[in-house]
Image: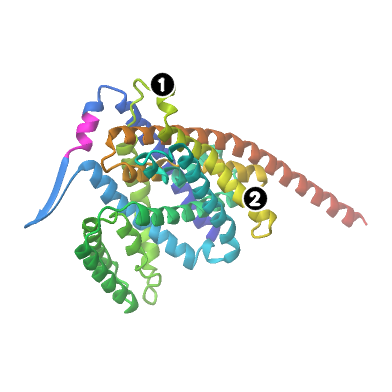
Amino acid sequence: MIIKSINDFLKMEAASGIILMFAAVAAMIIANSPLVVYYDMLLNIPVQVSVGSFEIAKPLLLWINDGLMALFFFLIGLELKREFLEGDLSQPGQVALPAIGALGGMLIPALCYVAFNYNDLDAINGWAIPTATDIAFALGILAIIGRKVPLQLKVFLTSLAIFDDLGAIIIIALFYTDQLSLLSLVFAASILAILFTMNRKGVTNTAPYIFLGIVLWIAVLKSGVHATLAGVVLAFFIPMKGEAGEPSPLVSLEHNLHSLVAFIILPVFAFANAGVSFAGIGIEQVMAPVPLGIIVGLVVGKQLGVFGFCFIAIKLGWAKLPTNVNWRLLYGAAILCGVGFTMSLFIGSLAFEQGNGMNRIFQDRLGIVIGSLISGVLGYFIIKSGVKTVNEDIAANNEEHTDKSNISYTN
């Protein structure tokens, strides 16, 4: 039952990755065609919600990035809570390797980016862009390779991405906030107090949590802290256990949100943010410090960080290589972590949204697309060759075991 649940989850993530690819490609095709005028007009449509003197007015693009992505982060929060309470990450032996790999996969890419942009005060704000991993894209690439990819590799990659997402949440909270509004923060804190009381009182009906979550999102949006973090915080208050005989409220919400996030929200976000025009792009634009720092961070930094930290941890005895996963597969997974796409685009939109001009946004998108593409292609071929060697080793071990059994029977 557990294996079937994991397989069903991975299949959904893989399908989402494939749809993400189509959405991103469609955005790039439109951005490089005469339709780009309508693409820009669509994303800049003003959308306003007002009640009396209170109003929220943003272009459609920011409603997608601040509003729809709050649901994405809400789902991440639900997955984090479930994994740490009952999932693979509740077992200390399963946590060490992906956690250490995620740490290296954030630290080394950030240093790579800083090495190219340390002398530019505006550009340095994008240091966190290459630290992200897009698990939907990564699992979509594994799905293309086929069913011969060991389940343990997928579980490792998914667990690493969960820690990666947790790191991204912390980075956004600490480094990508505007000027803070004390009044809005106090209001948000009061909502959190109510949510905490509801959780401790055993309220399992999710409707009050969702209503208060919307109010919390508005308060956080007005506070200067990025609004998507409200989704993560709300998830931590959703009860894990339901009333006697009732399903888990957290698991039910997670299940209901998966399709919405995987097949609608993430593709819409990718379509809205991946529209990079390649007109007039030459080696000079690619070799500019911002895109080059992102490319090196995703392609070189990720593999060095993830594989290097995992290698050291295994050699020091802090963690073990997963079953049916050899060093080549682990290295391929480390390279695949360089597919940063969705989260990288999101962090880039935060890093360069304030007064840095459209040129920075264009440069970060250019670096993300190129770096993610190179990482995806390299990871695909290395994992494909690694799968072949693992299957050959398993077949050889089975044959050896059969031979020993025959000898024992003959004796």
**Could you tell me if residue 111 is visible in this image?**
yes
User: Where does the magenta region start and end?
Assistant: 38-45
Disc 1 target residue: 282
Q: Is residue 346 above or below residue 169?
A: above
Q: Is residue 269 left or right of residue 38?
A: right
Foreground residue among 242 and 38 = 38
Left/right of residue 334 with respect to residue 369 in the rendered view: right
357 over 196 or under it: above or below: above
Tag 2 residue? 311
Q: Main secondary structure of the magenta part?
A: helix
Where is residue 21? Give x, y as percent: 41, 36
Choose the circle earlier in sequence order: 1 or 2: 1
User: The residue under label 1 is which amino acid type?
Assistant: Gly
Residue 309 image position (x, y, % from top left): 60, 51
Residue type at mark 2? Phe
Q: CA distance from mark 1 to mark 2?
A: 37 Å
Q: Residues within 10 Å of mark 2 (few under 14, many from 20)?
A: many
The verdict on residue 132 being magenta is no
